[in-house]
Image: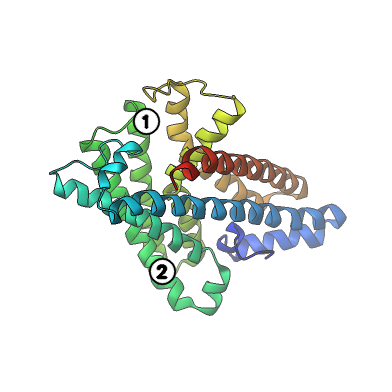
Amino acid sequence: MPSSFSPAALAGVAGRQATAVVADGLGPLGRVAGRALPWAATAWCAVAVIGQLIFTAYVLRFYGAAAVAGEPQRWNKVLPHGWVPGDTPANVLTSLHLLFTVLIIASAIVQLLPVVRRRAPVLHRWNGRFYVVSALLMAGSGLWMVATRKTVGDWPQHLAVSLNGVLIIAFALMAWRLAAARRFEQHRRWALRLFLAVSGVWFFRIGLMAWIVLNQGPAGFDPQTFTGPFLSVLGFAQYLLPLAVLEAYLRTREKAGPRTHLAMAAGLGALTLLTALGIGAATMIMWLPRM
């Protein structure tokens, strides 16, 4: 595998064998295709990891610094009703949600390191358990916040976020059950689905910023009310689109010929550039000014 950060590392033995067949059995085109797809997956994952680390730094610097300074009301500048004076249970739950945002990203990066699985399997297992439990807690608290607090957006966005939470819970339970049953190849697939679903709010931010940059301003939504058709679509696309790409990637690795491998690699390359654009825009417009 070309790099430590790669979804291919979690795709299972069958996927690696299929790639080897493409590379070794179909001449020069097969060899190019066999190398292109893993490298494309690695490139996207490396960019995503960098972007999530920047997002983590932002959460620590903005939300964490405000909490340490004893001024959690500053959260409301970004997170409406994030801190409500006198509502201690809700404020504690919001604080834990933010804390686990940082912890779960760090945990995910550790899980994506093949060297950890190979050389520290005990750490991999316990970190995986922590990741699953954290995902369940985050999804539960997120669903509670949507149901009880006046979050931004309209009902399609709230429905999309709620569906994201339900999928996180379902994927987490499936990943745990399959690991406990020692069905590791299937477990890795559900772990990848869980990772993408958990990253939904991050995909939303970079997707929104990429859209604004490409359109040279807000398009398809009202920035004052934060409602509009584009945001309604993005609310669902923030996790359904990455999940669809993952399924296409896994199927291509296992069954497709070299031309399909090359097409998938090209698609991942384009998505990597788009992801990098969204990360750069989100960093400069949303995150860095508050760090």
Counting from the top left corner in percent of width and height, residue 170 is at 35, 50
Q: Is residue 122 left or right of residue 144?
A: right
| Residue 244 shows in the view | no
* Residue drawn at x 33%, y 32% as measured from the top left: 159
Secondary element type, mark 1: helix
- Quick check: 268 above or below 155? below
Counting from the top left corner in percent of width and height, residue 14 is at 61, 62
* Residue drawn at x 44%, y 27% as measured from the top left: 231
- Quick check: 135 above or below 271? below
Disc nearer the start of the sequence (1/2): 2
Name the residue beneath numbered marker 2. 127
User: Which of these two is toward me, 236 or 153?
Assistant: 153
Q: How many marks?
A: 2
Name the residue beneath numbered marker 1. 157
* Residue drawn at x 55%, y 24% as measured from the top left: 217
* Residue drawn at x 56%, y 44% as measured from the top left: 279
Q: Residues within 10 Å of mark 2 (few under 14, many from 20)?
A: some
User: Which of these two is toward me, 196 or 275?
Assistant: 275
Counting from the top left corner in percent of width and height, residue 40 is at 68, 52
- Please, what is the three-letter code of the amino acid marked with disc 1? Gln
**How many angstroms separate mark 1 from mark 2 (CA)?**
32 Å
Secondary element type, mark 2: helix
- Please, what is the three-letter code of the amino acid marked with disc 2? Asn
User: Which of these two is toward me, 85 or 91?
Assistant: 85
Quarter holding the N terminus is bottom right
